[in-house]
Amino acid sequence: MTLKQYFPFTRIVGQEEMKLALLLNIVDPGIGGVLIKGEKGTAKSTAVRSLGQILPERLVVKGCPFRCAYGLEHRYCPYCTERLERGEDLAEESVGTKVVELPLSATEDRVAGTLDVEHILKTGEKKFEPGVLAQANGNILYVDEVNLLDDHIVDMLLDSAAMGVNYVEREGISFSHPARFVLVGTMNPEEGDIRPQLLDRFGLSMEVKGEKDLEVRKEVIRRRVDFDSDPDGYVTTCRPELNNLRKKLIKAQKALYKVKSDEDILDIIVNITTKFGIDGHRADITMMKAAKANAALEGRSNVEREDVASTAELVLSHRVRRRPFEENSFDSEELERCLQSI
């Protein structure tokens, strides 16, 4: 069976903020995912689904149903931990990172997985049927129209993404397994909004719009028509640039923990968040993580002012206080003035 080809990530015209936000989360999943808002036909789903073409491979425990990250024993699932305690030598295998999609109709059991209570009571052995969160471990979890998803499902996803663990309890019996993933949500604001308290849980956010420049719009049409006429051939011609981007991401991932920031960068970040009246400290921490990821992506060993400037709006746009009936209260010009004055 031929796998479905997606339009290449590197050939998406424009939408630079959206592409940057996705790449930053690949470099550092700890940023906290991304929420992409925008009208229909602005390449939201295309960009997310095409990530599979550039995602780096990863080492996992061979035979593990949760694909535990090999070598990180403190994060192992109960099965891998039990095998270690029995003295088994766990083998490693390299697998591709992928985009796992969550359907809107998914139930809580389908997402979290289920415990077979009857089997446990009869045999004394835990029997767990993995759900979407198990599939998502180590991958990208994509939710299209996230604003239409039941609130308790969104809460579950965000909690698991934040803790890196999926915890299931039924009839007083519990089971947990690693669930470390990058949560990516897309939505059309015309179809309803998302709860403000959930907005803050997404690390980055932006709103995408259709291109207005006539030449840019024509280029969008050219590329899409060429792709539709021969998807396999089109992707083949893009393979070198896709491979180069994957190598760039791998290099950035390895360099991330060597990236340093000085006191001046901290001053810039706290001045910005204070200026915009951001509550709590999540935005400050996320901005530092995003700036470091941007520096790593650009091949720098130290965070510079331009790294903060490139990522600040992605961190702040969904966290600023919104007045009643106001569509977007973020002031990009105010951010620019703030950066220049520090």
Image (tube, rainbow, N blue to C red):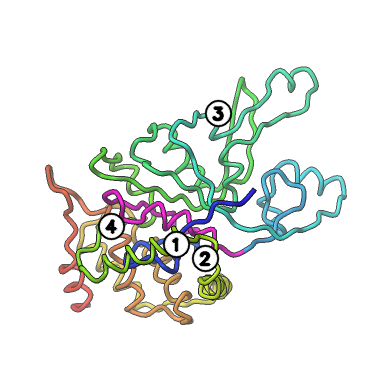
CB atoms of marks 1 and 2 within 8 Å: yes
For the residues labelled 4 and 3, the Cα–Cα distance comes to 33 Å
Which residue is located at x 69 percent, y 60 percent?
Answer: 59
Dot 1 or dot 2, earlier in sequence: 1
Specify the amino acid type for callout 4.
Val
Q: How many marks?
A: 4
Residue where numbered disc 4 is placed: 208
Q: Is residue 275 left or right of residue 118?
A: left
Reply yes or no: does residue 33 show up in magenta: yes
Q: Nearer the viewer, residue 299 or 268?
A: 299
Quadrant assignment, res 336? bottom left
Residue where numbered disc 1 is placed: 227
Extent of the magenta region: 29-56
Dot 4 or dot 2, earlier in sequence: 4
Which residue is located at x 62 percent, y 28 percent?
Answer: 114
Q: Secondary structure at mark 4?
A: strand
Dot 3 or dot 2, earlier in sequence: 3
For the residues labelled 4 and 2, the Cα–Cα distance comes to 24 Å
